């Protein structure tokens, strides 16, 4: 009875391991990165168009526009970096390692 129970546990562990490895192999589609790139370009274009009429005589944009632009860019850069790291779980900042 104990041997069959142990075999069942080992089978369950192998099944869970196979499922985990299968889940790790999933990657984000290229469309995801294409959309992030398009959104980034739209932010750059929108910032440029919206600040052109309000540029001061010394050539600097309003501080509010600069802060909003930096927050948006930071958000997209962090999101892009995070998804790139998650897309390849064995390299990058966040790594999946075998525990001992």
Image (cartoon, rainbow, N blue to C red):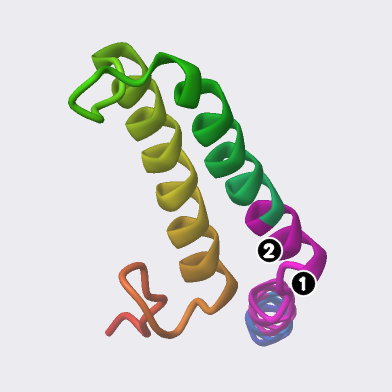
Instruction: Looking at this view, name the residue that lies furthest to the front.
Output: 57
Residue 3 appears at what percent x and percent y? 65, 87
User: Along the horizontal axis of the image, is 96 left or right of 8?
Assistant: left
Tell me the quarter of the image containing the C terminus.
bottom left
Residue found 64% across the figure and 80% down from its top: 17
- Which stretch did the figure color magenta? 13-37
Q: Is residue 57 above or below residue 83?
A: above
Residue 51 appears at what percent x and percent y? 45, 23
Question: Magenta residues: mostly which secondary structure?
Answer: helix
Q: Nearer the viewer, residue 74 or 27?
A: 74
Instruction: Looking at this view, name the residue that lies furthest to the left.
Output: 58
Q: Is residue 83 above or below residue 96?
A: above
Residue found 63% across the figure and 81% down from its top: 6
Q: Which mark is residue 47?
A: none
Tell me the quarter of the image containing the N terminus.
bottom right
Marks 1 and 2, how far apart in space? 5 Å
User: Along the horizontal axis of the image, is 2 left or right of 80?
Assistant: right
Pointer 1 with pointer 2, Cβ within 8 A: yes
Mark 1 lies on a secondary structure that is: helix
Residue 79 appears at what percent x and percent y? 49, 48
Callout 2 crowding tier (Cα within 10 Å): few <14, some 14–19, many ≥20: some
Residue found 53% across the figure and 43% down from its top: 44
Residue 86 appears at what percent x and percent y? 53, 66
In which quadrant of the rendered view does residue 8 lie?
Answer: bottom right
Q: Is residue 20 magenta?
A: yes
**Label 2 sits on residue:** 33
**Label 1 sits on residue:** 30
Q: Nearer the viewer, residue 48 or 11?
A: 48
């Amino acid at each position: 009875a104990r041997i069959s129970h142990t075999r069942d546990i080992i089978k369950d562990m192998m099944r869970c391991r196979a499922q985990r490895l299968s889940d790790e192999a999933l990657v984000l589609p290229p469309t995801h990165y294409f959309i992030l790139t398009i959104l980034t370009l739209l932010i750059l274009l929108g910032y440029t168009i919206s600040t052109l009429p309000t540029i001061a005589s010394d050539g600097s944009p309003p501080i509010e526009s600069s802060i909003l632009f930096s927050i948006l860019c930071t958000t997209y850069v962090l999101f892009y970096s995070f998804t790139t790291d998650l897309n390849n779980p064995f390299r990058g900042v966040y790594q999946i390692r075998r525990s001992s």
